[in-house]
Image: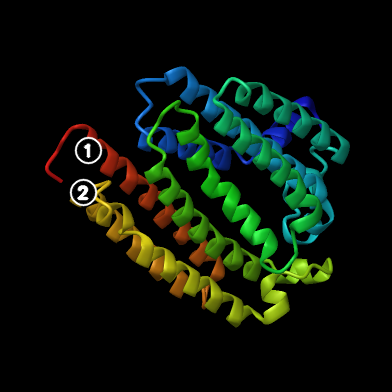
Amino acid sequence: MTAGETGRGLLELTRPVNVIAAGVLTFIGSFVAGGVTEEPIAVAAAVGATALAVGAGNAINDYFDREIDRINRPERAIPRGAVSPRGALAFSVVLFAGAVVLALTLPRLAIGIAVVNLLALIAYTEFFKGLPGLGNALVAYLVGSTFLFGAAAIEGGEIGPAVVLFVLAAIATLTREIIKDVEDVEGDREEGLHTLPITIGERRALAVAALLLVAAVVASPIPYLREEFGVAYLLVVVPADAIMLVAAYESFTDPTAGQSHLKYGMFLAAVAFIVGRAALSMSLPL
């Protein structure tokens, strides 16, 4: 492999789209907490730490999943030989170190969340992935916690809305992770993993995922009911809820399309919190 191919492989290990998405979610957490303009340096540090940690987590996940990926994802960097397993591991360590350096500049609560998340990222790939529901729940926590981390980076910020966003995002992510496990049943079974679809059956796992999503949708009006956000929030979160419900239904016939469309609904739901905070900041009557 040439240096260019190796460099491209290292970039692929981080999942750039996921890295950018996680950084955006952290930024949203800071925005919802009302601190983007007040503490831009802290926000930048939080976004950078999240991006590096997610990239590191994805790289180390590919390191531990290299044998499974030979079946499920042979086009990935390690299976196709663009990056060696040892190179992927070393790369993840460098990224983790960068994330730690940035996180240490933030308030104590943010540092605490960062420490828990870094340990959880490592524990997931080594111990929890493939355990029925537990690995999915840990991933769901990690995705949702990006909002909490962004809010905690703001000293004295309003963390309440971010907590609600964390819960809703975690539930929606748990739903998507279960659907993704249904999609990957063949390779997971080959490797002897005991994911939820393998343990209780694909249809039952999809039913669990759908019920979880319904619970998240039912809870989504909470910020409006608590008068934290106005009607502007509802105008965006209701279409997001509709997209996610349709995606859950679609997953029973096409898990790949279902989990992909569910992601769009999740991002639109995050936008609802931005709209709600923006309307509140500008004192709009919505």
Question: Callout 2: helix, strand or loop?
Answer: loop
**Amino acid carrying mark 1 in the image:** Leu
Instruction: Tell me how the rendering is colored.
Output: rainbow
Disc assigned to residue 280: 1
Residue 240 in the image, given as x and y percentages of width and height: 34, 58
Q: Residue at x 82, y 70 (%)?
A: 190
Residue 166 left/right relative to 126? left
Q: Residue furthest left?
A: 285
Q: Nearer the viewer, residue 6 or 169?
A: 169
Q: Quadrant of residue 135?
A: bottom right
Q: Nearer the viewer, residue 143 or 61?
A: 143
- Give neighbour class at mark 1: few <14, some 14-19, many 20+ (Cα, 10 Å): some
Residue 45 in the image, given as x and y percentages of width and height: 54, 23
Q: Residue furthest right?
A: 86
Mark 2 lies on residue: 230
Q: CA distance from mark 2 to mark 1?
A: 8 Å
Q: Residue at x 48, y 74 (%)?
A: 211
Residue 85 in the image, given as x and y percentages of width and height: 86, 41
Q: Are marks 2 and 1 in contact (CB under 8 Å)?
A: yes
